[in-house]
Each structure stands twice: as structure tokens, then as C-alpha cells.
Image (tube, rainbow, N blue to C red):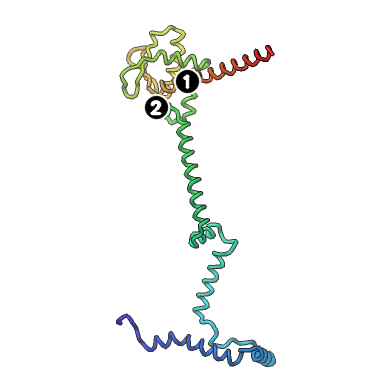
Amino acid sequence: MRAIDCDPKQAAEAAARVFALNAGLVAFHANCAGGDKLAAACHHRRAAGLRPQVPAGLRPHQQDSADVGARLSGIDMNRDDKAHRFVVTWNAFLDGNRLAYLSLTLAIGVDLLVFMSGLFGAQALRSPLSDVPSPKARSAHQLEAIIEAALLPDIFKNARLTLSAMHPREPVDGFTNEVRLYELDPESASQVRDVLNAGATIGAVRETDTRGHYLVRSELHTFLSDVVKRSSSGSRRRRSGGWASTGSRSASAKR
């Protein structure tokens, strides 16, 4: 009861607009209702040179007109066919459009697929040599190019030779293998030395106090093993293709 305000002035101001509308309706029915009254009233006002006039009680309040105009303007801007795509999409969400929610779900799913593909692709392009600590930043392609250039001209043979020259040892700061060049023949030592020089460039090889004795990190051993595996697989495929083509030619000759 305390929250109710029964001030007659406020009640009268609030009811004045309703009374004005009622009075305007009475005037409308008295003067304008029916085709004959409307035509006669308009004829007399034209004859007198006056403009048609809306009854005062039916004229919209100024504040109401402003509010309605603002709402209509907002609707025109947000609901128009030429509105911005983001505005149209936001309106669809506010309206509870199921197609909008379905589109959002599909977009999120596609974005997740692209993100996962990028992660898997980056992991696939990663090289074991990328884990070698180095003060200079190099890409996986650059690291592999340095080692592969040292393995030329016969990458498979020289990689096998370098792996054969490595001996396991107790890991020290990531160096898990050692190479003793003084135990190799001059030709093999020259080729292995080229690979060791390339490995030292990227920080995968370190010389000890003993001349001709080198420590090799596990990343270089892993990379050389991958090179040997790829080369061996390619050689088997080439031999299989050669045998298949030879067999087909023999069969054709017999026919």
C-alpha cells in the first residue's frame, strides 16, 4: 500500500491523454464518420481555402511520435534487405532461427577441422633436426638441406656409412653417439667428416679433447636413419617396378 501514489495531479495528467482521445473519437463520429459527412466537410473546407484538419484529440502526442519514429527507423535499418550481413545474422539469432544456429554449428565444425589439419600438417613437416639447440633459428627445410648436401652424391650410401661409423655411448647433454675418425680408412673418413662438419654447423656434433673423436646428438642419428629408410623404400619400389615391366615384356614376347 505504501508503494501506491494516489496524488490527484499525477492521476489527472496521466488520464488527460485518454480523455483527449475519447473527446477526439466523439468529434470524429460527429463530424467525419460516414462518407457523406466526410465529403461535405472536405468540400466546405476546400471552398473556404482551408486544409483538412485532424481533430485535436486524435493527434498523436509529440513524445509518442518521437518514440514511434525512432522504433520505425530502427526497424527500417535492421530489418531491411540491404542491411549489413552481420545485422541480418544477429537478428536471426535473436529471432531464434534454427537455420542460423545450424549455420553456426557448421562454421565452428569447419574451423575446427581446418585448425586440426594445420596442427597435423605442421607436425608432419617437423624434422628431427628441429630439436637440436642452436643459437640461430633455421627452418626444418634448411636444417635438412645442410645435412643432405653433405651426403651427396650418393645420399643413401653416405648416410649408411655415417651411421656405421657411430658408436653408442652414455648420453651427455643430448649427445648419445660418438665417431672415431682415426679408425676409418681415408676415403670413408673424408666422407664422414663432411657429414660431421655439417652437423657441427647446426649444433648436432661436438669435438672432444681427443683429436678425431666427435660426439653426435641423437637428432642427427634419427635423421640419418630416416634418410636411409626413405632411400631404401624408394629403391625397393623402383626395383619392383622394373621387375614388373620386365615380366610384362617377357610375357608379351612369349605371346
Q: Residue at x 48, y 86 (%)?
A: 18
In the rendered structure, the answer to whether residue 4 lies left or right of residue 49 reads left
Rendered position, 219 above or below 96? above
The residue at the point 42 percent across, 27 percent down is 128
Circle 1/circle 2 CB separation < 8 Å: no
**Secondary structure type for disc 2:** loop
Task: From the top left corner, tell me how far across and down residue 178 is, in percent.
Answer: 36, 16
Residue type, label 2? Val
Q: CA distance from mark 1 to mark 2?
A: 21 Å
Say whether residue 49 is visible. Answer: no
The kind of secondary structure element at disc 1 is: helix
Residue at image position (64%, 91%) is 37
Neighbourhood count class around disc 2 (C-alpha, 10 Å): few under 14, some 14–19, many 20 upward: some
**Tag on residue 229?**
1
Place residue 205 in its image quadrant. Answer: top left
Q: Quadrant of residue 239?
A: top right
Residue 34, image x, y percentages? 63, 89
Residue type marked 1: Lys
* Residue that label 2 marks: 132
Q: Quick one: quadrant of the N terminus?
A: bottom left
Give the residue drawn at x 51%, y 86%.
21
